[in-house]
Every structure is written in C-alpha cells, then in structure tokens.
Amino acid sequence: MTSYRLAVVGGGNMGAALVGGLLKGDWNAAELVIVEVLPARAAQLAEMFPGVAVVAETPSCEAALIAVKPYDVATACSAAARAGARRLLSIAAGISVAALQDAAGPDVVVVRSMPNTPALVGEGAAAMCGGTTAEEDDLAWAEGILGSVGIVVRVPESQLDAVTGLAGSGPAYLFLVAEALTEAGVLAGLSRQNAEQLVQQLFVGSAKLLAEQGNPAQLRANVTSPGGTTAAGLRALEEHGVRSAFLEAVMAATARGNELGKR
C-alpha cells in the first residue's frame, strides 16, 4: 500500500496553492495526495496537478495538511490520524491547538497556522505555532510547507488572532484602498482603464520598494516634499482619520477572530 509523504486534505484555493508551491520546490508529485470530496473540484485538481493523486478519502500518509472549513477540521484530523499521519499542519481559521490535538489524539504532533491569500501567487505571509509536543524538526517541517508560497513567522498561539487581523484580513484592506484610489483617479478625470493600470502598478512598485528598503515612514518622507502635492494629500488623509481607521480595522478583525475561536 502506498503511504504518501503528505496528504492535503481539502482542495480549495489555499490547499491547491500549497500543492503548487511544493511542486515548484523539491517535492515530487508521487509524494502528494489531495483529498477532495467534490467530484467537479477533484477533476479540476487532477488536471491542474498531473501525477498528483486526487482521492475522496484520506489514504495512508506520513503527515497531513488540514485545509478544510473549520466545521470539518475535527473529522479531517481524526481521519488523517487513523490513516497514519504523525504530523498535522492546520490552516483552518479559529481552530485552536488544543482542539486540533483533541481531534488527532496524543500521538500526533500538531501545528496551527494562519496563511493569507497572496499565497495564491507565491507571495503569502503566514504565521504558525506548534502544539505542546512539537519540536524543532516539526516546526521546520511546517515552515517548509508554508514557506513554499511565501514567508513564515513563528508566534505564540495567543498572537495568532492578531496575525489574522493584520495579515489574514490585510489583503482586503489593501484591495479596498486600490478600489478607492481607482475611483479617485476617475473622479480626477482619468479613464477607468488608465486609473486601474496606474493603481495596479502603484501597488506593485510600492511593495517592491518596501520589500527592498523597509522603513515605510522613511519611504513616505522620501516622496513628500515640503508644501508639495503629496503633503497636501497626506494632510487630507490624516484629517479624515485614515491612520486611525486602519488601527481600528485590525483591532476589530483581531477581536472577531478571538470570538470565532471560542465557539
């Protein structure tokens, strides 16, 4: 009987993104299996990843990535443990390490993580924490999987809700800013097509500058001439409480993540 190196339980966007990232690294298709119960999605995954087995039930495996909806996590963890998995990495939002451990049993090492949607293009930002029995090699294993589609940081479990509020929800905040900037460009007289192109490249270029140079406050200062156009625009943003709005957004999302985790 084949025992797979990793079973990816759940073939949604994030599970598929991680499979793609692993295959671009040093993983072979024959080492992976995707567990997907929806026939139409299973057929899509088989076409997306030639050579990767796609099945409806968790087969014999050494480890499993749990990428299902929160209400299916306990069942998925139990099934993976019965299939022989001795390590579980969960990317399900709001499911605690304790809940993962209860579902998997005491003999399985669990790691909880929070990735974000830029993982779909290999530029994710994820945080993770290990269960009480997780050792350095277990954490390194989890980092290797999550790191195939972006960066990974280690945090205490108590900080994962903050990661959710910042990095997990953060793409939506930035997309809202992109929408608003596009509308502003149209209001100022640009065609929608030109406004969209300019805003897209504005985000790409600014992100590259930030990644290469860091220090966003200094980068902002670099483009802000005294008494100039940028200074006028920034003053308007501050007068309308944009900085405070972002602070409140992150705190609200963090609090909501905490509430969901207590259900």
Image: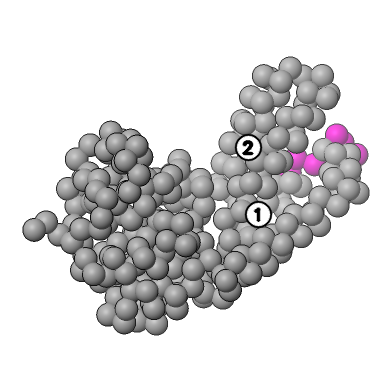
Q: Nearer the viewer, residue 175 or 71?
A: 71
User: Do the residues bearing badges 2 and 1 touch, measured as CB atoms within 8 Å?
Assistant: no
State the residue at coordinates (31%, 54%).
8
Report the magenta residues as a range: 222-229
State the residue at coordinates (49%, 68%).
95
Q: Position of residue 116 (x, y in %)?
A: 52, 52
Q: Position of residue 150 (x, y in %)?
A: 44, 51
Residue receiving disc 1:
215
Specify the quadrant that holds the C terminus.
bottom right
Q: Choose the circle earlier in sequence order: 2 or 1.
A: 2
Residue 98 in the figure: left or right of residue 30: right
Residue 139 in the figure: left or right of residue 198: left
The quarter holding residue 111 reads: bottom left
Does residue 153 appear anywhere in the picture?
no
> Is disc 2 surrounded by few (<14), some (14 to 19) or many (20+) residues within 10 Å?
some
State the residue at coordinates (58%, 56%).
167
Check disc 1 and report its element: helix, strand or loop: loop
Magenta span has 248?
no
Which amino acid does the dot numbered 1 rest on?
Asn
Residue receiving disc 2:
203
Does residue 191 appear anywhere in the picture?
yes
Magenta span has 224?
yes
Q: Magenta stretch mostly in which secondary structure?
A: loop
Which amino acid does the dot numbered 2 rest on?
Phe
> Is disc 1 surrounded by few (<14), some (14 to 19) or many (20+) residues within 10 Å?
few
Q: Position of residue 62 (x, y in %)?
A: 21, 65
Q: From what the image shows, is residue 120 above or below residue 4? A: above
